[in-house]
Image (cartoon, grey):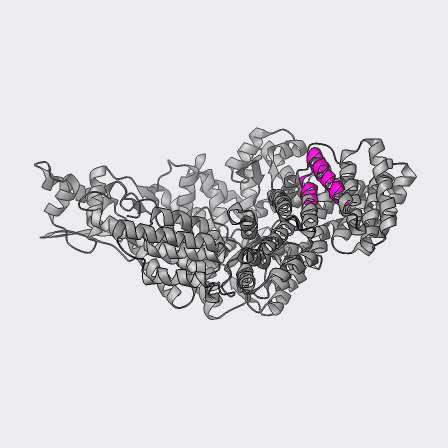
C-alpha cells in the first residue's frame, strides 16, 4: 500500500491485472473485516459495472486466492469477503508499528533508537500511498490517512536527528520540507532550530517571519504557542537550544547487503540478547569461510546499532596481511585521521567518549593483532566489539558464538533465490526438489557453497549439478586435519568450482590472485595477459565480481576464493614471475600518479590512484621484502612518497625503514637510495619528528651531491632550509633555500621554484618583512596553480589569509581563506580543511559574527590532536588569540554546539556565503 499496490511472495512480486489490483486494494483497506460484493463491485468498476460484475468478482477472488502467499487467505461469508493476513504481512501495518515504536523510543529518551526505527518505517515507502488508486473514491480516505502519517513519521524522525546533533546534515532536507509544507508549524520549528544550531540565527528568524505572514494571510491565524516560544528563545539565544553533547551522531553507516537475509531469525535473536541484554563486549562469530558469518554479523549490527549512542561501524580486515595495519584500518573506517602518535593511541583517544558497536570482519588471518582488541576494550569502556573469524581467538573476555550451517529449508530457499538471480527463467519444479535437497546437503548448508552451485543453473540442471558434485565428495575429508571440518568442505566446494573452469580460465584465476583489494581491466591485462573473455567467464562463474566506478570497471575476488587460487598459483612455476610483474605494474601506475616530489611532471597529481591501490601496493611491497627485490620495492615506495607524506606518514616510515634497512639495499643504485632517503625523511618530518628527519635529508643530499644530481640536491637544500627556519636559524634557512632556488631557476624547474618562492616568503614573514612575505607567498600560489599542484596552492592561499588577518584586512583574508578551503575540500586534504575552517572562524569572530565563529571553532579546535596538520599548527595560536579577544557568551554557546559538527559539515558551513 505504501506505493503502487503490489503483492509479494517468497520468490518475488506477483503480477496482477488492473482489476485484481483494485479488488485487492479494496480488501486490504478493510483487512480483517467483511466487504460486501456491492462495495467490491463499486471499487473495481465505479458507477458503471458490467451486468456480470458479481460473477466476475467471484472469478477474480478465485485468482487472487491462488496468488496470495500463505498464510494470507480470503475468507467467504454470507455477507461478503474478508482478507485475513498475519501480523506484519501488510507494509502499512508494519509502517504504523515502527512509527509507534519510534515514538515510544523518543519518549523514553533514546533518539538513536527512535531515528533507526523511523528510518526503517520510511524505508518501507515506494511512492504515493496506493499509487494510481490514491484518488479513487474507495481508497482516497485511507491514502490520505497514510500520507499524513508519513509526514508525521518524517517529523518524528527529524526530531530524533536533531536530538542526535545532526542539525547540519538535516538542514537541506528541512528547508525543502518547510517550503513544500508551509503551514505545518512543526516543520517550520524544526527548520528554525536546525538553522540556529548551525549558527544561522538570522535565517532562523527570517523563516519565522515568513511562516507568521503565511498563517496570517492564508488562514487568518497567529502562529501557535510552540512556534512563538521558539522564536523568543532564539532571540534570547537560550543555551538550552544547543544540542546535548551526549547525543553524538554515528560515525559511519554499515554497508548495505545486496540481498535480504534468509532465515537466521533464532540466531539474530540470540545475538541481540548477547549484545543488548547481557552486554557482552567481545562477541566473536566463528565458523568456516562461507558459512555466512559476515552477513549474520551485519544484520545483528544493523538491528542492534540503534541501542548504541554512536551506532555501529564496519571494518573489513580481509585485505590486510600485516597485523600492524589493523589499528590504522580501524582508524580509517571510523573516519579518524592518522595521528603522529601510534594508531592505537589515536584510536583509544577517539573512541573513549563514544558508545559504539564495532564490527571487525575476517580476523582469523591476523591473530597476532587480536590482543589489540582486548586493549581497546580496556581503554574504551563504552565500546563493544563484534568480530567474525574462522577460528576462536582465545582472548580474555571472548564470547564465542559458532555460526552453524543453514537449516535444510533455508538452504533450499537460498538455492532457489540465487538460481533465479542467475537464470530468471528458472522455476521451482517438484521434479528438481530432491536433487536440490541433495546439493544443499552435500554442501553442508554453507551459503557460499550453495550460491556457487546455484550460479551454475545457467548451464546445468539440478540433477546434472548433483552428478558433478558426487565425484568431488571424497575431497571433503582430504584437507589438512588441523583445519575446521567446514573449512575442508568449503575447500572442496572451491575445488569443484575451479574444476568447472577450462584450463585457460583456471590459469587466469590463479594469476589474478596476485591482486589484493581489486584490479582494473588494464591491470589484469598488464599482469596476467590480455584476456577479456576470460574475465567475463570468471564473472559468469561468480569467481569474480565486477563493479562500476568513475574510472571504469573494477574486479574483486572473494577472499576465500582468492586464497584458494593463490595456493594453486604457489604450486605452479609462474608465481615469482607474476608477483614481479604485479610489482612492476604497480610501480608504473604509481609513477603515473606523479607523487614523487623529486620528479614532479606537469599535468597534476592523481592521489586517487594511490588511494585505490593501497592494498595492491602493500602486497607488492611485502613480496619485494620477502624476495629481496629491494630495488623494485624502493621504486614503488618512492612513487608513493607524496601520498604517504600527505595522508599516512606512519605507513611511509614503516615501508621506507624496512626497505632501507634490508641487507640487499647496498646493491641498489645511488640515485634510488637518495630519493628513498628523502621520502623517508619527509614521512618522519611530517609525523612530527623534525630532528630525526634532518639526518635523513642530509644523507640524501650527500648521495645527490656524490651523483652530481643538481635537481635532487636542490630539493634537499630546500627541505633542510625548512628545518632551519623552524629552528629559528633564519639566515641559514634563507641561504639554503636561495641556493635551492638558484638551481631550479637554472634548470627551469617550475615546481621546484614554486616551493622555494613560498618558503622564502615564510622566512620573510618570520623575519618581520611582511611586504616581501605577501609578495613571495602570492607568487608561490600563482605558480602552484600554473604547474597544477592544488594542495600547495591551497597552503599558500591559507598563508596569505593568515597574513591579511594579522594586518586587519578581513575582506582579503576571507577571500583567500575561502579559496584555500574550497581547494582543500576538493582534495579531501584534512590539514587544509581544518586550516581553512579555522581561518574563517577567526574572520567571523573579528567581524562580530560570534555564533558563526563559535560554531566553526568548536568543530575544529580539537582536530589537530588527531593527526599532523602542517601549517595550521603554526598558525593556530595566533588565530586563537584573535578569537579570544572577540569571544563572549554567544561564542561559547555556539562553540559548544559546534563540537558536535563533523568536519564535513563544518566545511560546508564555512563555505556558505550566505552566512558570511
Q: Is residue 643 magenta?
A: no
Q: Looking at this view, is 155 or 181 the one in front?
A: 181
Residue 809, x across and y down, in percent: 65, 48
* Residue at (92% x, 40% y) in the render: 706
Instruction: Give the vertical position of 541 relative to 488 (above or below).
Output: above
- 220, above or below 21, in the image: below
Residue 322 can be seen in this image: yes
Q: On the image, which quarter does residue 862 sit in?
A: bottom right
Q: Is residue 497 left or right of residue 755?
A: left
The residue that appears at 48% across and 71% down in the rendered structure is 278
Write down the region rendered in magenta.
773-796
Q: Horizontal placement of 525 versus 650: left or right?
A: left
Return the x and y of residue 302 as percentages of the image width and height: 46, 57
Of the pair 738 and 156, the residue shown nearer to us: 738
The image position of residue 559, as x and y in percent, is 58, 47
Rendered view: 721 above or below 221: above
Q: Quadrant of residue 106?
A: bottom left
Residue extending furthest front? 808
* Residue in the foreground of this view, choosing between 623 and 713: 713
Provide residue 345's location: percent of width, then percent of height: 67, 62
Magenta segment's dominant SS is helix
Say whether residue 777 is magenta: yes
Direction left: furthest residue: 51
Amino acid at each position: 500500500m505504501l506505493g503502487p499496490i503490489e503483492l509479494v511472495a517468497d520468490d518475488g512480486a506477483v503480477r496482477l491485472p488492473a482489476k485484481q489490483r483494485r479488488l485487492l486494494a479494496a480488501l486490504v483497506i478493510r483487512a480483517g473485516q467483511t466487504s460486501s460484493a456491492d462495495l467490491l463491485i463499486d471499487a473495481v468498476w465505479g458507477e458503471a459495472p458490467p451486468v456480470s460484475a458479481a460473477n466476475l468478482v467471484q472469478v477474480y477472488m478465485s485468482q487472487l486466492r491462488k496468488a496470495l502467499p500463505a498464510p494470507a487467505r480470503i475468507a467467504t461469508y454470507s455477507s461478503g469477503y474478508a482478507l485475513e493476513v498475519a501480523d506484519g504481512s501488510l507494509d502499512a501495518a508494519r509502517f504504523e508499528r515502527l512509527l509507534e515504536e519510534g515514538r515510544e523510543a523518543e519518549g523514553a529518551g533514546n533518539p538513536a533508537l527512535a531515528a533507526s526505527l523511523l528510518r526503517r518505517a520510511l524505508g518501507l515507502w515506494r511512492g504515493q500511498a496506493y499509487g494510481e488508486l490514491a484518488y479513487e473514491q474507495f481508497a482516497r480516505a485511507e491514502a490520505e490517512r497514510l500520507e499524513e502519517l508519513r509526514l508525521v513519521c518524517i517529523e518524528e524522525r527529524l526530531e530524533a536527528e536533531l536530538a542526535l546533533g545532526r542539525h547540519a546534515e538535516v538542514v537541506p532536507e528541512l528547508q525543502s520540507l518547510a517550503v513544500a509544507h508551509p503551514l505545518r508549524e512543526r516543520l517550520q520549528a524544526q527548520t528554525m532550530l536546525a538553522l540556529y544550531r548551525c549558527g544561522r540565527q538570522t535565517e532562523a528568524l527570517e523563516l519565522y517571519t515568513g511562516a507568521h505572514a503565511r498563517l496570517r494571510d492564508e488562514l487568518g491565524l497567529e502562529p501557535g504557542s510552540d512556534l512563538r516560544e521558539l522564536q523568543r528563545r532564539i532571540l534570547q539565544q537560550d543555551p538550552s537550544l544547543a544540542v546535548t553533547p551526549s547525543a553524538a551522531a554515528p560515525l559511519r553507516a554499515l554497508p548495505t547487503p545486496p540481498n535480504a537475509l534468509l532465515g537466521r531469525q533464532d540466531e539474530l535473536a540470540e545475538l541481540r540478547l548477547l549484545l543488548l541484554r547481557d552486554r557482552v563486549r567481545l562477541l566473536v562469530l566463528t565458523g568456516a569461510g562461507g558459512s555466512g558469518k559476515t552477513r549474520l554479523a551485519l544484520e545483528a549490527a544493523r538491528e542492534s546499532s540503534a541501542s548504541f549512542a554512536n551506532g555501529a561501524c564496519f571494518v573489513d580486515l580481509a585485505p590486510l596481511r600485516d597485523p600492524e595495519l589493523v589499528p590504522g584500518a580501524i582508524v580509517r573506517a571510523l573516519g579518524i585521521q592518522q595521528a603522529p602518535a601510534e594508531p592505537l593511541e589515536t584510536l583509544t583517544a577517539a573512541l573513549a567518549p563514544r558508545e559504539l558497536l564495532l564490527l571487525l570482519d575476517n580476523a582469523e588471518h591476523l591473530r597476532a593483532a587480536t590482543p589489540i582488541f582486548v586493549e581497546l576494550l580496556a581503554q574504551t569502556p563504552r565500546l563493544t566489539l563484534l568480530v567474525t573469524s574462522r577460528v576462536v581467538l582465545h582472548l580474555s573476555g571472548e564470547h564465542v558464538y559458532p555460526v552453524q550451517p543453514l537449516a535444510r529449508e533455508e538452504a533450499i530457499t537460498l538455492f532457489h533465490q540465487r538460481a533465479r538471480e542467475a537464470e530468471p527463467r528458472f522455476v521451482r519444479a517438484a521434479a528438481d526438489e530432491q536433487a536440490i535437497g541433495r546439493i544443499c546437503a552435500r554442501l553442508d548448508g554453507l551459503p557460499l557453497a550453495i550460491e556457487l552451485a546455484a550460479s551454475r543453473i545457467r548451464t546445468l540442471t539440478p540433477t546434472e549439478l548433483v552428478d558433478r558434485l558426487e565425484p568431488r565428495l571424497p575431497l571433503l575429508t582430504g584437507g589438512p586435519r588441523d583445519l575446521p571440518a567446514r573449512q575442508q568442505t568449503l575447500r572442496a566446494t572451491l575445488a569443484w568450482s575451479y574444476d568447472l573452469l577450462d584450463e585457460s580460465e583456471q590459469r587466469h584465476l590463479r594469476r589474478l590472485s596476485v591482486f589484493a583489494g581489486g584490479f582494473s581491466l588494464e591491470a589484469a591485462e598488464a599482469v596476467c595477459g590480455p584476456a577479456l573473455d576470460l574475465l567475463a567467464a570468471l564473472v559468469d562463474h561468480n569467481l569474480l565480481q565486477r563493479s562500476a566506478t568513475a574510472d571504469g570497471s573494477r574486479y574483486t575476488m572473494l577472499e576465500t576464493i582468492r586464497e584458494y587460487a593463490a595456493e594453486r598459483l604457489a604450486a605452479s612455476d609462474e608465481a615469482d614471475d607474476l608477483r614481479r610483474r604485479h610489482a612492476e605494474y604497480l610501480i608504473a601506475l604509481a609513477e603515473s600518479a606523479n607523487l614523487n616530489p623529486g620528479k614532479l611532471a606537469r599535468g597534476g597529481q592523481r592521489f586517487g590512484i594511490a588511494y585505490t591501490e593501497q592494498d595492491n601496493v602493500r602486497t607488492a611491497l611485502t613480496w619485494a621484502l620477502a624476495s629481496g627485490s629491494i630495488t623494485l620495492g624502493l621504486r614503488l615506495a618512492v612513487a608513493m612518497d607524496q601520498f604517504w607524506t600527505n595522508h599516512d606518514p606512519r605507513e611511509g616510515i614503516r615501508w621506507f625503514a624496512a626497505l632501507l634497512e634490508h641487507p640487499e639495499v647496498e646493491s641498489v643504485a645511488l640515485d634510488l637510495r637518495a630519493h628513498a632517503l628523502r621520502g623517508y625523511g619527509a614521512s618522519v618530518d611530517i609525523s612530527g619528528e623534525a630532528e630525526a628527519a634532518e639526518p635523513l635529508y642530509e644523507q640524501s643530499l650527500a648521495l645527490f651531491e656524490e651523483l652530481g644530481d643538481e635537481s635532487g640536491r636542490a630539493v634537499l637544500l630546500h627541505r633542510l632550509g625548512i628545518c632551519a627556519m623552524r629552528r629559528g636559524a633564519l639566515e641559514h634557512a634563507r641561504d639554503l633555500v636561495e641556493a635551492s632556488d638558484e638551481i631550479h631557476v637554472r634548470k627551469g624547474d617550475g615546481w621546484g621554484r614554486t616551493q622555494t618562492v613560498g618558503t622564502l616568503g615564510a622566512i620573510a614573514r618570520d623575519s618581520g618583512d611582511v611586504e616581501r612575505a605577501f609578495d613571495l607567498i602570492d607568487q608561490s600560489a600563482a605558480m602552484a596553480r600554473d604547474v597544477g599542484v592544488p594542495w600547495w596552492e591551497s597552503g599558500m592561499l591559507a598563508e596569505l589569509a593568515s597574513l591579511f588577518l594579522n594586518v586587519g584586512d578581513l575582506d582579503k583574508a576571507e577571500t583567500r581563506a575561502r579559496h584555500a578551503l574550497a581547494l582543500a575540500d576538493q582534495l579531501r586534504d584534512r590539514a587544509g580543511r581544518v586550516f581553512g575552517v579555522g581561518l574563517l572562524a577567526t574572520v567571523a569572530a573579528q567581524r562580530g559574527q560570534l555564533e558563526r565563529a563559535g560554531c566553526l571553532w568548536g568543530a575544529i579546535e580539537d582536530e589537530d590532536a588527531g593527526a599532523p596538520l602542517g601549517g595550521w599548527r603554526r598558525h593556530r595560536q595566533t588565530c586563537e588569540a584573535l578569537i579570544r579577544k572577540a569571544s563572549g557568551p554567544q561564542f561559547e554557546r555556539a562553540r559548544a554546539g559546534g563540537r558536535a559538527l563533523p568536519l564535513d559539515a563544518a566545511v560546508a558551513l564555512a563555505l556558505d556565503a550566505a552566512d558570511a
